[in-house]
Image (cartoon, rainbow, N blue to C red):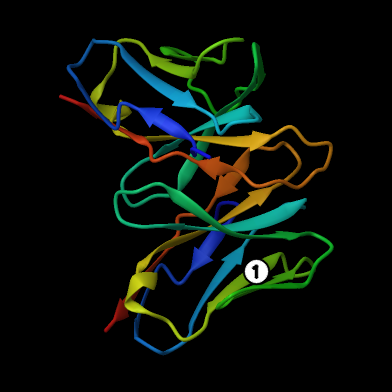
Amino acid sequence: NAGVMQNPRHLVRRRGQEARLRCSPMKGHSHVYWYRQLPEEGLKFMVYLQKENIIDESGMPKERFSAEFPKEGPSILRIQQVVRGDSAAYFCASSPLTSGSSYEQYFGPGTRLTVT
Amino acid sequence: SQQGEEDPQALSIQEGENATMNCSYKTSINNLQWYRQNSGRGLVHLILIRSNEREKHSGRLRVTLDTSKKSSSLLITASRAADTASYFCATDTGRRALTFGSGTRLQVQP
């Protein structure tokens, strides 16, 4: 049973380029979350998606950042016109569909974005 | 301070000793979770404790939750060098988005 998969593991972009980060949730999981981690800090929530729906994007910067989770294929976090401040580790997590209020989130290995 | 704040920020102990980390938070929660992160790696889920639970055990891990004080503790007994990592608490207020603290960096000396 494969875990959450993220690719690429490392991504280098020049300022002004676009970054696309991919996340495949665990099999059977229909909820995906994206978090960002700056060096020596904890993770900060960005966005929560279900298939074809953005449920909560309260942590997403208003500009340049977008996320999607299509019916088929992985979830994509897209950063347009990257700046040096976007350099961070981006983690994806998934959880199963559940009617309960408590659940575990399973994290991928992360994508480390470096903007030069 | 932010929701889910760990204390201490860093902890260094000898192998075989116990390690205790604390987490404080500000708002009501559905549950609180502890995660471990090895340097440069992803997060590993350790334990989830619901708001109506007071204590939970998993192997060498013991987690307590005091909702009246809005605090939780993680105890690792008989620590090993392999326990060296950063430990984060994360709170779920019902929005499903987790709020993480800045972590406790644990160093276990062999």
Label 1 marks a residue whose chain is: B
**Is A78 or B3 nearer to us in this picture?**
A78
Amino acid under label 1? Ser
Residue A21 position within the rendered picture, expressed as x and y whole percent measured from the top left: 38, 21
CA neighbours of label 1 inside 10 A, class few (<14), some (14 to 19), many (20+): many
Identify whether A43 is placed above or below B4.
Answer: above
Q: Residue at x 35, y 86 (%)?
A: B15
What residue does disc 1 label? B72
Give me the residue at 40% from left, 30% from top. A6
Q: Identify the secondary structure beneath mark 1.
A: strand
Query: Which residue occupies 54% across, 30% down?
Result: A25
Q: Is residue B60 left or right of residue A36?
A: right
Q: Quadrant of the N terminus of chain B?
A: bottom right
Q: Is residue B26 visible?
A: no
Position above or below: B30 against A18: below
Q: How many marks?
A: 1
Q: Position of residue A73 (x, y in %)?
A: 51, 13
- The percent coordinates of residue A31 (x first, y second) are 64, 28
Q: Is residue A28 visible?
A: yes
Which residue sits at x=83%, y=42%?
A100
Report the side of A39 relative to A12 (left or right): right
Residue B55 image offset from top left, x and y in percent: 74, 74
Residue B64 position (above or below residue A33): below
Horizontal side, residue A9 vs residue A98: left or right: left
